């Protein structure tokens, strides 16, 4: 069997028609290819080299922050050193999702600008200063790799999250150029909000992408169509009730200099609604697999795979349900 290093980066032994990502919570085990293991080992082997690149990049940003203090530019090196290099597991997961070994944020860090909306400063001062120090914007589809995801400039995320993404490479590098991702945020409160939201919301609801159910072109009214709808409703609750408030509160502090915050809380009615969404999602998942098994009666191998997939999916949904409940309890204790 020929194995594509990208499309089959992860795969199960029985079902070759659907690529599986196995970066799930402890306790849920899936078959995985040795390609993934080898890739992660190679990444770990290169960690010291990547750290040298990161240290030089951070020295540069520290120097630039000092140069542009009057423009409200700051670089928190202590914060940057918490996660200067993308982990082996996160890198392999990104390769699987993107279908490319070109990882844009292998080395990544954050810089604060009190007014990232000032595009004149970005283009006429900040980027030339980076050029002078040996870093130029990478290219994507022939264009400079810079993305303004700000309100009124570009498109913020559905969660309400805003930033500027830039990817740099060293001008002197001839080949195997390592990309250095720089994220521009409003300030330290926004960075903290990003951390909390990632841990409590983003990393949790992203796990819905690991389900075996194929939602592609799902017929209206089908079990998979309804299941996907319930997933979207759960994500919307998480974004509207948690993510947007976190980011709005942080932006108010860093950008608008407003201390008042909108507390994050869930009414009994909110919690009942979310519980109903999860219950309905589990029911539609069972119905989906029941229908699939009816269609596969003539194939024992397919039936075995479907039973396994159903068990895996329900286990994962139950896990997300439990962790969502834990997230709600967290914000009941920490409403701000």
Image (spheres, rainbow, N blue to C red):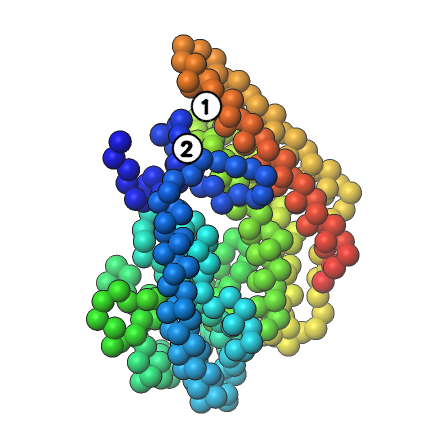
> For mark 2, what is the residue?
12
- Compare residues 256 and 147 and report the one nearer the observer: 147
Residue shown at 56% from the left, 37% from the top = 28
Please rate how many residues cluster around mark 1, counting C-alpha atoms within 10 Å: few if below 14, some from 14 to 19, many from 20: some
Does 238 sit above or below residue 3? below
- Compare residues 140 and 263 and report the one nearer the observer: 140
Give the number of marks. Answer: 2
Q: Name the secondary structure under disc 1.
A: helix
Q: Position of residue 186 (x, y in %)?
A: 54, 73
Toward which corner of the image does residue 197 lie, by quadrant? bottom right
Is the residue under label 2 in contact with that under label 1 (CB below 8 Å)?
yes
> For mark 1, what is the residue?
305
Distance Cα–Cα, label 1 vs label 2:
10 Å
Q: In the rendered structure, which disc, 1 or 2, sits on the residue that comes first in sequence?
A: 2
Q: Would residue 85 appear left or right of 246 to someone viewing this image?
A: left
Toward which corner of the image does residue 311 lie, by quadrant? top right
Does 324 sit above or below residue 80? above
């Amino acid at each position: 069997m020929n194995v594509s290093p990208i499309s089959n980066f992860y795969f199960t032994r029985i079902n070759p028609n659907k690529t599986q990502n196995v970066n799930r919570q402890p306790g849920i085990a899936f078959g995985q290819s040795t390609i993934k293991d080898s890739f992660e080992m190679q990444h770990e082997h290169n960690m010291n080299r990547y750290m040298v690149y990161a240290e030089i990049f951070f020295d540069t940003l520290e120097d630039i922050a000092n140069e542009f203090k009057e423009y409200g530019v700051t670089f928190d090196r202590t914060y940057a050193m918490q996660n200067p290099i993308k982990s082996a597991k996160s890198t392999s997961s990104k390769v699987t999702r993107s279908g490319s070994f070109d990882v844009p944020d292998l080395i990544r860090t954050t810089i604060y600008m009190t007014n990232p909306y000032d595009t004149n400063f970005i283009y006429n001062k900040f980027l030339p200063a980076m050029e002078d120090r040996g870093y130029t914007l990478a290219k994507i589809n022939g264009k400079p790799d810079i993305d303004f995801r700000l309100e009124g400039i570009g498109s913020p995320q559905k969660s309400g999250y805003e930033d500027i993404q830039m990817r740099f490479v060293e001008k002197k590098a001839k080949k195997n150029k390592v990309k250095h991702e720089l994220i521009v945020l409003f300030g330290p409160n926004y960075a903290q909000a990003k951390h909390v939201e990632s841990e409590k919301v983003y990393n949790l609801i992203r796990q819905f992408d690991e389900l075996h159910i194929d939602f592609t072109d799902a017929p209206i009214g089908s079990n998979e169509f309804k299941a996907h709808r319930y997933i979207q409703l759960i994500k919307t609750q998480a974004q509207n009730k948690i993510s947007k408030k976190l980011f709005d509160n942080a932006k108010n502090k860093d950008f608008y200099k407003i201390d008042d915050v909108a507390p994050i809380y869930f009414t009994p009615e909110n919690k009942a609604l979310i519980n109903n969404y999860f219950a309905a999602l589990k029911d539609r998942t069972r119905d989906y697999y029941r229908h699939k098994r009816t269609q596969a009666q003539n194939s024992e191998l397919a039936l075995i795979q479907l039973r396994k997939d159903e068990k895996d999916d329900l286990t994962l949904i139950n896990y997300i349900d439990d962790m969502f409940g834990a997230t709600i309890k967290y914000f009941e204790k920490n409403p701000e």
